[in-house]
Every structure is written in structure tokens, then in C-alpha cells.
Amino acid sequence: MPTKKADSSPRARKNAKKSSKNSASATTERSRAGSSKSTKLSSRAVLREVEPGSTVECTHCGERVKFQAKMRHKQVICNVYVGRRWDRVEHFHAPCYDEADAPYGEPDTTPPIRLPKSARAAEAAKAS
């Protein structure tokens, strides 16, 4: 029985690439939807130190979330989504967030990634 020879024309190769791309993206979408870790954007909270120059007010108590060099106060920063769109950022004193019954879930305590000064300078130069 003769075997069918694969078409090696440029058009056939292009169609084969397009077909494999479409099936790969469909697979990716299915695996994301079925995965245990959702990619849906939702409100979330992180615990961070209050940084110098902070001028925000606590959403719960209304007082300023202020930096004190010797105290190292913590704040909870929340990205709030309404529907599937980002809406605002809310700041809380760490104790106030607990008093408010953690409205955006348990805060993530993973430390932020700090870039070296040279990398920050390069990013700033690229942005301007």
C-alpha cells in the first residue's frame, strides 16, 4: 500500500503552522479554565511595611497610615475589582484590616521583589 507523501509546499507549511497554533491556544484556554489556580482577576490584599512619605488614609478608621522610623508599622494594601475590572486601591492599618474582618481575604505576606538601584535607574530611563 503506497504511503501518502506529505505536502511540503509553502502554503501547506503555513496552514500546518496556523492549525497547530490554533489547537495549542485552545488547549491552553481549556487547561487554564480547568486548573485549580484561577486566572480570574479578583480583589486581593497584601501586607507591607508603611514606607516613608506615605500619605494615604485607612479605609476602616479614616486616620492616616503613617511611617514611623522606629516602629515599623504594617499596612494592608488591597487591589479592589468590581466585576472583572480594577476599580481602586484601599489601604488599612494592619489591626484595622483584622477589625474589618478581612474584607478582601487573608493578606499575602510574600515580601515584595526589590530591584537593585541600577535596574531601577534603567527602568526609569526606559519609561521616559
Image (cartoon, helix red, strand yellow):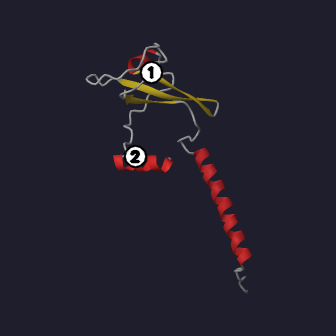
Name which residue type carries label 1: Phe
Q: Residues within 10 Å of mark 1 (few under 14, many from 20)?
A: many
Mark 1: secondary structure = strand
Task: Identify the residue position indicated by label 2 in the image.
Answer: 120
Which residue sits at x=70%, y=65%? 19
Q: Where residue 84 sits in the image (x, y, percent)? A: 63, 34
When asked about the image quadrant of residue 112, the answer is top left
Vertical placement of 113 versus 84: above or below?
Answer: below
**65 vs 105, nearest the viewer:** 65
Q: Where residue 66 sits in the image (x, y, percent)? A: 37, 21
Which residue sits at x=45%, y=22%? 56
Mark 2: secondary structure = helix
Question: Dividing the image into 4 quarters, which one contains the N terminus?
Answer: bottom right
In the drawing, does residue 16 fall left or right of residue 64?
Answer: right
Which residue sits at x=72%, y=69%? 15
When asked about the image quadrant of residue 17, the answer is bottom right
Name which residue type carries label 2: Arg
Q: Single out the residue that lies furthest toward the left.
A: 70
Q: Where residue 45 sits in the image (x, y, percent)? A: 47, 29
- Whole-angstrom CA distance, mark 2 to mark 1, is 27 Å
When asked about the image quadrant of residue 108, the answer is top left
Q: Is residue 116 visible?
A: no
Task: Identify the residue position indicated by label 1 in the image.
Answer: 92
